[in-house]
Image (cartoon, helix red, strand yellow):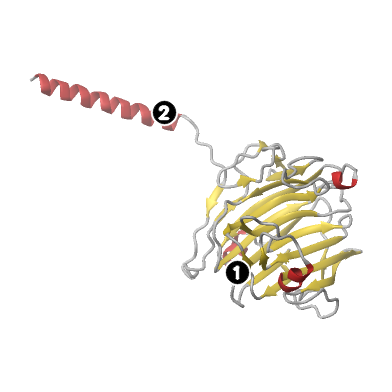
């Protein structure tokens, strides 16, 4: 009889604890950070699908500082200070990324090689023989000030240990925003600094220059070639419209990361193909640790030449990484 009563008491106690836990769970709001896992369509080869498949539109974030979930930051000391969630008059939320003089300088850079950055990124994953489609919207605010130096705002990088070379794809401004530079390194000796010989073999690049209301290609370099000015193979559209300060533009980027000849790097700006490389995209020597996608601002510091560059902020929205362009187009339909 005593054991029976004890069992009833313990059962009642356990049920009360369970009910209390359920009450607590549903009594407090669960904060979601708008991260959506995007399903991979059945028609995509599962062997080549992207290791990332997500969509982040920042709508469920609170105005103020960025709350990280799956993304990380490339932190060299400034923490989350460079990242703020803001809202337009129409209610749309977006991420503002700001870089300031001296912020996030790489401590391993020698004096005279200082940099400043504010970047957020995917976690490193292995991408060899994978097809990856990346999209995002970006805006330079109306008060944006260009500088006469490198300002990079996108990277897809095959990381090695150590790594002293350029990403497979970087998108950069130069010369007070009058030059748009696309491309990077398809391979080489990861632990060795830039050399002309390796650049000739592995570099892919296209440069556009501002003229009135358009960007016009003026220089291009394919893998295995030196810089050329006339035989443009990487740039099927020789010009495209400049986006005014204060207006949004959309980038769509396709990458097939492979040692084989059927790799590719494609860049669409507002649905216009502005870079179209086909060939080997991974030809590295070194210990490969994974790849990542970075968005934000990475610039050379004015400290190198004894001046202080102004603060720069860039806006980002609708950051998506998926396994095929059809899915990417469905999310970024303009």
Residue tagged by mark 2?
24
* Residue 143 in sight in this render: no
Q: Is residue 113 left or right of residue 55?
A: right
- Closer to us: mark 1 or mark 2? 1
Q: Is residue 47 left or right of residue 290?
A: left
Which residue is located at x 45 percent, y 29 percent? Answer: 27
Q: Earlier in the sequence, mark 1 or mark 2?
A: 2
Residue tagged by mark 1?
256
The answer to whether residue 188 is above or below residue 70 is below
Residue 60 at x, y percent in the picture? 59, 42
Residue 134 at x, y percent in the picture? 63, 60
Residue 334 at x, y percent in the picture? 69, 62
| Pointers 1 and 2 in contact (C-beta within 8 Å) | no
* Residue 216 in sight in this render: yes
Q: For mark 1, does the 10 Å Cα neighbourhood hold few (<14), some (14 to 19), or many (20 or more) residues?
A: many
Mark 1 lies on a secondary structure that is strand
**Foreground pick, 68 / 291:** 291
Q: CA distance from mark 1 to mark 2?
A: 47 Å
**Foreground pick, 66 / 42:** 66
């Amino acid at each position: 009889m005593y054991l029976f009563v004890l069992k009833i008491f313990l059962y009642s106690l356990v049920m009360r604890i369970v009910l209390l836990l359920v009450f607590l769970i549903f009594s407090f709001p669960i904060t979601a950070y708008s991260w959506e896992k995007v399903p991979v369509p059945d028609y995509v080869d599962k062997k080549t699908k992207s290791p990332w498949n997500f969509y982040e539109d920042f709508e469920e974030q609170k105005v103020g500082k960025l709350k990280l979930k799956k993304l990380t930051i490339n932190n060299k000391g400034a923490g989350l200070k460079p990242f703020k969630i803001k809202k337009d008059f129409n209610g749309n939320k977006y991420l503002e990324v700001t870089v300031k003089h001296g912020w996030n300088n790489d401590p391993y850079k020698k004096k005279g090689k200082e940099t400043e950055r504010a970047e957020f990124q995917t976690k490193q994953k292995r991408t060899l023989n994978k097809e990856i489609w990346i999209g995002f919207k970006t805006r330079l605010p109306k008060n944006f000030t260009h500088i006469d130096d490198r300002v990079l705002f996108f990277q897809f990088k095959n990381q090695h240990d150590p790594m002293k070379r350029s990403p497979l794809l970087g998108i950069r401004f130069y010369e007070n925003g009058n030059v748009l530079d696309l491309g990077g390194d398809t391979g080489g000796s990861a632990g060795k600094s830039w050399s002309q010989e390796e650049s000739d073999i592995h570099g892919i690049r296209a440069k556009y220059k501002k003229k009135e209301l358009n960007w016009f290609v003026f220089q291009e370099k394919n893998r295995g070639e030196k810089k050329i000015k006339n035989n443009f193979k990487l740039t099927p559209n020789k010009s495209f419209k400049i986006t005014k300060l204060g207006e949004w533009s959309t980038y769509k980027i396709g990458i097939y990361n492979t040692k084989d000849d059927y790799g590719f790097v494609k860049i669409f700006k507002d649905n216009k193909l502005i870079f179209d490389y086909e060939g080997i995209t991974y030809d590295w020597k070194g210990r490969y640790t994974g790849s990542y996608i970075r968005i934000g601002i990475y610039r050379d510091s004015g400290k190198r030449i004894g001046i202080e560059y102004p603060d720069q902020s860039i806006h980002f929205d609708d950051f998506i990484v998926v396994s095929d362009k059809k899915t990417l187009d469905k999310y970024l339909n303009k």
